Image (tube, rainbow, N blue to C red):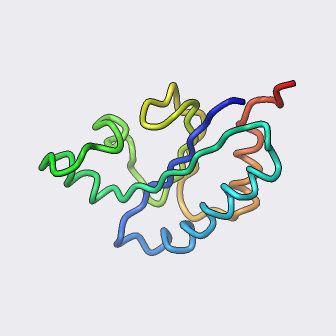
Amino acid sequence: MAGHTLVFYSAAWCDPGVPMNKIFHEILRDVARARPDVSLKGIEIDVDTEEENQQTGALSPAVSEGALASIDFLPMMVLYAGDFPRADAEILRLVGQLPKRHILAQLLEALPAEEV
């Protein structure tokens, strides 16, 4: 079973992040139903909290500084191959407040073919 991680990046001040957070959780459920052969883990990251943690060292960072620096628009969902934060590579980046059907279609297309 292939492992992937879908990370939802947002911030408390990001109004579109509120409905997108609900869609994020629905997407995780829908992908699990549509592709039971793929292991998809979901992680939510508040970029402001993460940046503060990295600057102060209060908590272990959830993402690398490079990954955090690459987030230039919120909300954002990024699909990684492998277990996060040690993901092998970014596969797909979805930026902004997008329709659920669009997100689901893009994710299902980006995931590898079913393993037999």
Q: Position of residue 24 (x, y in %)?
A: 60, 61
Relative to 18, say whether 58 is above or below.
above
Q: Residue, x 61% and y 62% (percent of image)?
A: 25
Residue 15 sits in quarter: bottom left
Give the answer, above or below, for where 113 lies relative to 108. Answer: above
Q: Is residue 36 left or right of residue 55?
A: right
Q: Which residue is drawn at 44% across and 30% down?
A: 86
The picture places residue 29, in percent across and down from the top left corner, at 71, 58
**Above/below status of 49 relative to 35:** below
Residue 65 is left or right of residue 20, and the answer is left
At x 57%, y 65%, the residue is 97
Name the image quarter holding the N terminus.
top right
Q: In this view, does 78 lie to the left or right of 54?
A: right
Residue 95: percent from left, percent from top: 54, 53
Quadrant placement of the C terminus: top right
Nearer to me, 93 or 53: 53
Residue 58 position in % (x across, y down): 16, 51
- Give the vertical position of 57 relative to 89 (above or below): below
Write the residue at 48% across / 68% down.
17
Q: How many marks?
A: 0
